[in-house]
């Protein structure tokens, strides 16, 4: 029974990613190879470890002034995550022959972001997994349910947004400018979400959720706009 609860806890960590990835893959009229989607997902999972190291070093650099630089630290951590996620996907996928449509940039970076979010979910569920019980399993389920409409959705949306700007940069032959715009926008979205969590979580989780729902409308619009572009990249 203990082993079953442990396995169940690990499966829970993957559920939000599976749901969001399934939904967003439907936006691609010419589905990408499942193997490449999964490999990109894996890249997102692996880059989590490097991000944690960079964030730990940033925290050490600000030691002693962490409270005074709270807003700056939120921005710095968000920037590290969004930059590392994008460039790991950029260098992995940009020369693949399957990367041949503008919408592909959004699809692959969504997959990568979900890989990143899944490792975060595993870390957060770890205490429940190492001390498994019916109670801890249900507590872990509540945590994952909150992350489904929280952090996991956040990484899905930021991946889609920076992918959209990457695709625009390719089409307009100005990748550097548009990628920079995408990273700035996703960093602002990420830090706003984290700030809302810090300020309102003890009162009401609904505010960060409403923020992400609003962002979702823009992302769905971006998918529709980029799907209208028929020429290859």
Image (spheres, grey):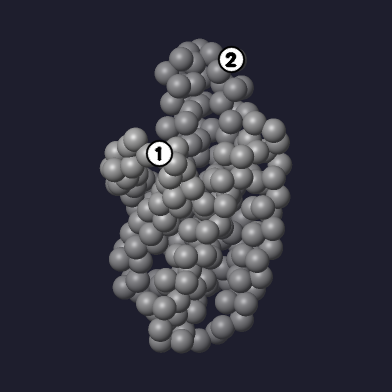
Residue 214 lies in quadrant? bottom right
Callout count: 2
Q: Which mark is residue 89?
A: none
Instruction: Name the N-terminal-most of marks 2 and 1.
Output: 1
Secondary-structure class at tag 2: helix
Question: Residue sitting at 40 percent across and 51 percent down?
Answer: 76
* Coordinates of residue 188 in the picture (x, y in percent): 52, 59
Instruction: Compare residues 8 and 179 and report the one nearer the observer.
Output: 179
Q: Which residue is mark 2?
A: 134
* Coordinates of residue 101 in the picture (x, y in percent): 48, 77
Crowding at mark 1 (Cα within 10 Å: few <14, some 14-19, many 20+): some
**Residue 112: in sight, yes or no?**
no
Question: Residue sitting at 48 percent across and 36 percent down?
Answer: 121
Q: Is residue 183 left or right of residue 222?
A: left
The correct choice, above or below, for 71 with respect to 137 in the image is below
Q: Which residue is mark 1?
A: 66
Closer to the observer: label 2 or label 1? 1
The correct choice, above or below, for 189 with respect to 131 in the image is below
The correct choice, above or below, for 228 with respect to 190 in the image is below
CB atoms at circles 2 and 1 under 8 Å apart? no
Residue 3 lies in quadrant? top left
Instruction: Compare residues 19 and 150 and report the one nearer the observer.
Output: 150
Question: The C terminus lies in which quarter of the figure?
Answer: bottom left
Instruction: Compare residues 31 and 9 and report the one nearer the observer.
Output: 9
Question: Residue sitting at 37 percent across and 39 percent down?
Answer: 65
The correct choice, above or below, for 19 with respect to 26 in the image is above
Secondary-structure class at tag 1: loop
* Coordinates of residue 119 in the picture (x, y in percent): 42, 40
What whole-number distance in Å separates the C-alpha atoms at marks 2 and 1?
38 Å
């Amino acid at each position: 029974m203990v082993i079953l609860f442990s396995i169940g806890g690990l499966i829970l960590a993957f559920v939000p990613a599976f749901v969001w990835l399934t939904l967003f893959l439907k936006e691609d009229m010419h589905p990408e190879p499942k193997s490449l989607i999964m490999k990109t997902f894996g890249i997102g999972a692996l880059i989590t470890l490097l991000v944690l190291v960079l964030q730990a070093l940033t925290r050490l650099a600000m030691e002693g002034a962490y409270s005074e630089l709270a807003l700056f630290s939120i921005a710095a951590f968000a920037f590290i995550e969004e930059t590392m996620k994008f460039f790991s996907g950029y260098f992995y996928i940009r020369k693949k022959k399957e990367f041949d449509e503008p919408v592909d940039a959004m699809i692959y970076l969504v997959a990568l972001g979900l890989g990143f979010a899944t490792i975060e979910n595993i870390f957060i569920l770890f205490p429940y997994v190492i001390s498994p019980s019916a109670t801890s399993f249900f507590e872990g389920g509540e945590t994952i349910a909150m992350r489904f409409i929280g952090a996991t959705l956040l990484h899905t949306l930021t991946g889609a947004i920076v992918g959209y700007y990457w695709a625009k940069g390719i089409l307009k032959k100005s990748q550097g400018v548009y990628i920079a715009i995408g990273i700035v926008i996703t960093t602002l979205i990420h830090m706003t979400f984290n700030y809302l969590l810090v300020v309102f979580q003890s009162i009401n989780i609904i505010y960060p959720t409403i923020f992400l729902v609003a962002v979702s409308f823009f992302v769905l619009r971006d998918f529709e706009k980029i799907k209208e572009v028929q020429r290859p990249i």
